[in-house]
Image (cartoon, rainbow, N blue to C red):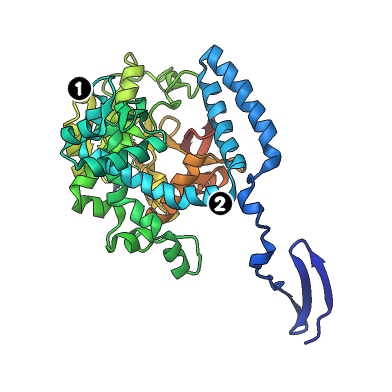
Amino acid sequence: MPPIATGTDASGPITVHIKDSVQISVEEPVQEPIQEAFVDGDVAISPNVPDQIPALLRRVALHGEAYLTEKDEEERTTVLDAARALVYALETPREAMIRHTWCQSSLYAALETAVDLGVFPALSKDDSPKTAAELAAATGADPTMLARILKHLNANGVITETGPDEYRRTGFTISMCSPRYSDAYPCMTGCITAGVLSLPAALKKTNYANPHNSTSCGFQLGFQTPLHFFDFLKENPVHAVQFNNHMTAYHQGRPSWMDIGFYPVLSLVADTGINERDALLVDMGGSMGHDLSEFRRKWPQVPGRLVLQDLPDVVQQARGMGLDARIEVMVHDFFEVQVVRGARAYYMHSVLHDWPDSDCLRILRNIVPAMKRGYSKILINENVIPSTNAYWETTSLDIIMMADFASTERTETQWRALIEAAGLRVVKVWTVRRGVESLIECELA
Ligand SMILES: C[S@@+](CC[C@H](N)C(=O)[O-])C[C@H]1O[C@@H](n2cnc3c(N)ncnc32)[C@H](O)[C@@H]1O
């Protein structure tokens, strides 16, 4: 069939045909493969985004100075973001490729080995430098092997070298003495990373469709299991404990919705006549109860019951955490109708992002019958992906969600559509800072 029009657009030449006399089809322009010769040899060994470098250098210097004088957390994160952007602009494509392909997996392996051996507690015992031989003696490792691991950890800023095969602890090594932080490494290996690494194959298999089936996605491919992630955890209690520990740590040190200036916490009790017998907050899928513990610590005088709900094994672990006696712990499957009726707020933190829309709808609709109109709220503490400049922690989590849960981090439009489909309405999306989970306040529509 002869073309009716030809021309060019930004992607190259296009050809338009009349098909069946009414439909117009646009032939994809044939993409010329980039020939090896086309890649200027200098590109791969020159800074990646040279025109950004001057402004980023100035930004680091300016905010670095402000951070040094004010010790302000916002200045710290501004410098950190600028410094990271500066590295990406300054490093050459070759360097970036080596960092991605050699460094990320090998550093992970070195870190997990060090965690497993107990290198970090041995190094953190006191502030004095320790030799590789001393650390090997303390951990029972082969000194030659450990010396190699330690060199790689130093090369990546994890520990500080003080001389040949001699190292001093850092804030990072001290933090790794707590399973709350160190469990992240075996946890990711035990129940997350193989799914992420299988994502390319899983996507290829489904012709690059956005995943929706959480029992047939990267997770099942990577871990060679038919089980859903949370059923896999039931079968693997060691990883389940590590996962729950990781949950208590990953959002530490960032603004929390219950901090002053984020969400008006006292509006939950003002003019409600709420008393100690009434349910104030029901934390669904609340894991170790860390959010309710934080609430009790930050708002000790606020009346009302705090109820922690999760699956049986998780609840059992939570009971051993020495929670405040005023936190009630209860087994509840959120795919069943909510049993605590008429609470002031049903709260979910990093729960709905684990599930595709169809499951989220079931979870939300199971709360609705328990809600008291004009009084009960649902508080959803989750990432709201911005239309530009999404934060790397959030996008990392989004890819993990895609790979292991066939679920997603959501944009505001996606959240609103989901919440409204469950017969609810969004009162307000409370947000303080880039990269920090928002609080989506909802009530019955
Ligand atoms: C990603 S974690 C979030 C934990 C906690 N809310 C936080 O933000 O740290 C998801 C939680 O949902 C719980 N969960 C999964 N399926 C559940 C179900 N059917 N009913 C109740 N809780 C469930 C898990 O055990 C886990 O504690």
- Specify whether tag 2 is near ligand 1 (CB below 8 Å): no
Mark 1, other Cα within 10 Å: few <14 / some 14–19 / many ≥20? few
Q: How many marks?
A: 2
Q: Give me the disc on residue 325.
A: 1
Residue 262 x/y as whole percent = 49, 23
Q: Does residue 418 lie above or below 59 as drawn?
A: below
Q: Residue at x 25, y 44 (%)?
A: 145
Secondary structure beneath label 2: helix
Circle 2 sits on which residue? 94
Q: Residue at x 19, y 45 (%)?
A: 238
Where, quadrant-wise, is the N terminus in this rendering? bottom right
| Amino acid type assigned to the residue bearing label 1 in the image | Ala
| Residue 238 seen | yes
Q: Quadrant of residue 265?
A: top left
Residue 158 x/y as whole percent = 37, 33
**As rendered, which of 345 and 70 lies closer to the eye?**
70
Q: Is residue 210 left or right of residue 389?
A: left
Q: Is residue 411 left or right of residue 298?
A: right
Q: Residue at x 28, y 45 (%)?
A: 187
Residue that extends furthest to the bottom in the rendered view of this protein: 1
| Amino acid type assigned to the residue bearing label 2 in the image | Arg
Secondary structure beneath label 1: loop
Q: Quadrant of residue 201?
A: bottom left
Q: Residue at x 50, y 46 (%)?
A: 410
Q: Does residue 222 lie above or below 150 as drawn?
A: below
| Residue 408 seen | no
**As rendered, which of 383 and 132 lies closer to the eye?**
132
Residue 169 x/y as whole percent = 32, 26
Return the disc, 2 or 1, that comes first in the chain's sequence.
2
